[in-house]
Image (tube, grey):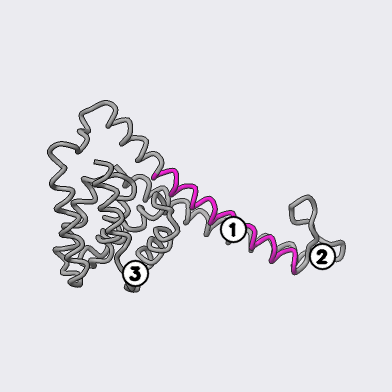
Amino acid sequence: MKRLTGAALCLAMALPALAAPPVDNLTKGIQLYKAGQYYKALGYFQDSVKKKPKVWQGHYYLANTYLSLGDRDQAYEQYRLCQACRPTPDIEAACEQIVSKLAAASTTSMPSYNDPDANRSRNQYLIQQKQAILDDAGRQAQLNRDRTMNAILNETAIGNGGRASFAPDATAEDHERAMKIQRETEKKNEAIYEAARRRAREIK
């Protein structure tokens, strides 16, 4: 079955690059997918097909991502959905070829999720996916904090052990402006965290 999955995956990845429609989640997912960050890309593609179920590119990339992660059942379903959305002829043909290979092996090689080992693998897969989403949110939040720190340092402060420390001639307005910037940053970060937590909760 590994040979089958490998062949199907090679076929999927050998197809020409697709022009992504102007959908933020799809665009971000494609960037992560091409970078080989499949767990991170997965959540973005899932959001994309949920919001735009008739856009075939979302189903196509989601199917490729599932296949890359070894989830052949979900890959099969998404390739079928991609076909239902009337993709270009080359993508339609590629989807049909991969679907045929997956279907041919399904009765003999597909793992059963009633099997304890398969269930453990499945749970680990879901945990990793959720953690990747939360880690990505943490990195985005830290990047926002770093940018805020740089803005404060550039205006009225000096570095002090990695924290913002105001110069002796800083005014009360300087202090207030810095605090305002930090509050706005944390408000943005909370929105990032909440969106990540929501996406993680939707993974089942």
Q: Residue furthest right?
A: 168
For the stretch drawn in magenta, the main secondary structure is: helix
Where is residue 182? Give x, y as percent.
Answer: 63, 59
Write down the quadrant of residue 97 in the picture.
Answer: bottom left
* Disc 2 versus disc 1: nearer the observer: 1
User: Which of marks 1 and 2 precedes in the sequence?
Assistant: 1
| Tag shown at residue 143 | 1
The amino acid type, in three-letter code, at marker 2 is Ala
In whole angstroms, how far apart are the C-alphas of marks 3 and 1?
A: 30 Å
Residues in magenta? Answer: 129-154
In whole angstroms, how far apart are the C-alphas of marks 2 and 3?
A: 53 Å
The quarter in which the C terminus is drawn is top left
Q: Which residue is mark 2?
A: 170
Task: Give neighbour class at mark 2: few <14, some 14-19, many 20+ (Cα, 10 Å).
Answer: few
The amino acid type, in three-letter code, at marker 3 is Ala
| Tag shown at residue 17 | 3
Element under label 3? loop
For the question of whether residue 180 can be seen, the reply is no
* Disc 2 versus disc 3: nearer the observer: 3
Q: Residue at x 20, y 72 (%)?
A: 88
